[in-house]
Amino acid sequence: MDHGSEFEDGLKRSGLKKTKQRTAILGILEESQLPMAADQVFIQLKEKGIPANLSTVYRILEALAEKKLVNKLSIVGDNRGLFELNRMAHRHYLVCLGCKKITAIEHCPLEDYEKALEAETSYKIAGHKLDIYGYCPKCLEKRRKGS
Amino acid sequence: MDHGSEFEDGLKRSGLKKTKQRTAILGILEESQLPMAADQVFIQLKEKGIPANLSTVYRILEALAEKKLVNKLSIVGDNRGLFELNRMAHRHYLVCLGCKKITAIEHCPLEDYEKALEAETSYKIAGHKLDIYGYCPKCLEKRRKGS
DNA sequence: AGAATAAATGCGCATTATTTGCAAATTAAA
DNA sequence: TTTAATTTGCAAATAATGCGCATTTATTCT
């Protein structure tokens, strides 16, 4: 009997039953370095030969987000929900406005700021979302000629 | 002949024709201190007695975003696009995860960070989106009792 | 292991958010 | 004001997501 990855184990801890769809979805998110939309996850499941229904994928992703095993997010110019594995070390993305490519950013410059904000507003800060937008070298090149 | 507000004038500059729907929408966004969804804008138009079709509202908001007169954004847990007037002074929001209330934050702690990132990635940074999530005092109170 | 129980999934359909095609109306230019 | 180019209205198409209920599956209990 093999136990799943560090992340798949989260299912038990969160009181969710361990089903093949859920384990598979966590696996897929774990492999992906970037956030995924429900239908992308769905396609991956198919490719892995795991039977699943799109509604189920939505339900699972919502449930995982509820339990904080994954984060639900959305980026500008893309009106659908994206999901990423909650690796605790939270991430930020650099998004190219030209080709829409998404790159993860390492360092987060906001810890101190949040403290200050808590003091100032009496909110309990739970987290934040930071994405940075710009143009990647390739798209810069195209713009220089094109436009 | 009266000329519109600072923001309505942006229409000419951007090469968009000045129609009553567009001017009205810019006006509505200008009055609103918070980002609005297409259907909220639509309702405001009705209330002001300005005839408009929801598709037109979507098209106008998209067009204005295209021309950078407004910013299109989206926040976690709300899967629809939100639009706010581009006041150049960019804004960040503090979102309550309980009641979903949105509050604007004044100061932006990211200027220096962007410089560094540009150098590091060769991207041309155009801007960023930062939202901070937490629980407002009221919702904190509820949680303390409830849950 | 087998039965009981609670939870999860599949499937088809309902909704909500957004987009599109095309004819009619409107704006800016001449 | 006639024209040419946009823009709008309307209706119908998509896209993304959610829901209800019968069936299946994961855990618990024996």
Image: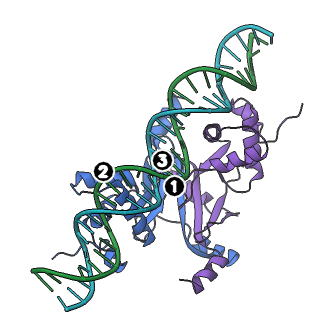
Chain colours: A blue, B purple, C green, D cyan
Mark 3 burial class by Cα count in 10 Å: few <14, some 14-19, many 20+ = few
The residue beneath circle 2 is A43
Instruction: Estimate the x, y position of residue A21 in percent, counting from the top left.
Output: 28, 63
Amino acid at circle 3: Ser
Q: Alpha carbon of mark 3 to alpha carbon of mark 1: how far?
A: 8 Å
**Given the current orientation, which residue lies at the most extreme right position?**
B1
- Report the chain holding disc 2: A
* Residue nearer the viewer, B88 or D19: D19
B90 to the left or right of A125: right
Quadrant into which the N terminus of chain B falls? top right
B10 to the left or right of C8: right
- Report the chain holding disc 3: B
The residue beneath circle 3 is B122
Residue shown at 44% from the left, 65% from the top: A71
Instruction: Estimate the x, y position of residue B76 in percent, counting from the top left.
Output: 53, 61
Query: Count of labels shown?
Result: 3
Amino acid at circle 2: Ile
Mark on residue B117? 1
Circle 3 — which element?
A: loop
Mark 1 burial class by Cα count in 10 Å: few <14, some 14-19, many 20+ = some
Mark 3 and mark 1 lie on one chain; the one further toward the N terminus is 1
Residue B134 is drawn in which quadrant? bottom right
B109 to the left or right of D2: left
Nearest-to-viewer mark from 3 and 2: 2
Question: Visible in this render: residue A66?
Answer: yes
